[in-house]
Each structure stands twice: as C-alpha cells, then as structure tokens.
Amino acid sequence: MAWSQDEERMLAMIERHLTDEDPKLAARIESFNHRVERREHGGRRRPADPSADGAGSRWPRRSTLIITLSWVLIVVLITALLIMALQHNAAALAL
C-alpha cells in the first residue's frame, strides 16, 4: 500500500514521539512488526495453497475440529434437555 508524503511524515512524527516518550513500548512494537513480517514471508506458517502440503491438506485444522465438536456437543445437550423437559411435561399432564 502506497502512503502519501503527508501520511509518511505524520507516521514518522508519531514514531519519534513514541520513541521519546516510551522507548520500551516502541521496542516491543518494533519486535512485533519483525515477527509479523517473518510470518508473512515464510515463517512457521502453513502454505497458502492447501494442495502444496501433501498429507496435511487431508485433515482440517485442530481449531476447526474443536469448534465443530463443541457445536455437536451443544446440539446433543440441548436435544437431551428438550426431550427430558417434554417427557416431564407429558407425565405431569397425565396426572
């Protein structure tokens, strides 16, 4: 993304003020920027093309599995609760 000269000047001014006021925070932000750049340019991340990774592309990610299993568990529990509630109401009406 191209920045205009005014935007670049403003960002440089903000960076100078931040470095003067809180050098520890400025160092942490700089370290974070370096880590993000490393990940974007081939760090420990998965390849963007799933077909490039042979066996790894067969299975979904762990987070996807956890979320799916959580939703299944929620549905099962709500279903069990509804069945119990309906049976209880039916028994109460029969009396």
Image (cartoon, grey):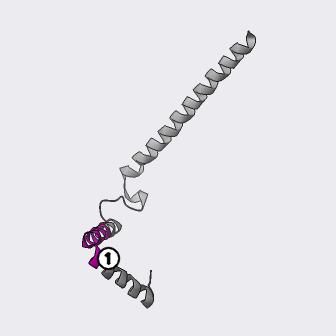
In the picture, residue 77 is in which quadrant? top right
- Seen in the image, is 55 located left or right of residue 92? left
Q: The C terminus appears in which quarter of the rendering? A: top right
**Main structural element of the magenta stretch: helix, strand or loop?**
helix
Please state which of residues 20 and 50 is positioned toward the viewer in this rendering: 20
Under tag 1, what secondary structure?
Answer: helix
- Seen in the image, is 64 located left or right of residue 28? right
Please state which of residues 89 and 48 is positioned toward the viewer in this rendering: 89
Please state which of residues 10 and 5 is positioned toward the viewer in this rendering: 10
The correct choice, above or below, for 72 with respect to 90 in the image is below
Badge 1 crowding class, 10 Å Cα cut-off, few under 14, some 14 to 19, many 20 or more, is: some
Is residue 30 within the magenta segment?
Answer: yes
The correct choice, above or below, for 17 with respect to 51 in the image is below
Residue lying furthest top: 95
Mark 1 lies on residue: 18
Q: Is residue 59 visible?
A: no
Q: Residue at x 74, y 14 (%)?
A: 93
Task: Tell me where the magenta segment starts and ends, as one range.
Answer: 20-35
The correct choice, above or below, for 94 with respect to 72 in the image is above
Q: The N terminus appears in which quarter of the rendering? A: bottom left
In the picture, residue 28 is in which quadrant? bottom left
Q: Position of residue 5 (x, y in %)?
A: 42, 90
Please state which of residues 40 and 55 is positioned toward the viewer in this rendering: 40
Residue type highlighted by circle 1: Leu
Q: Residue at x 47, y 43 (%)?
A: 67
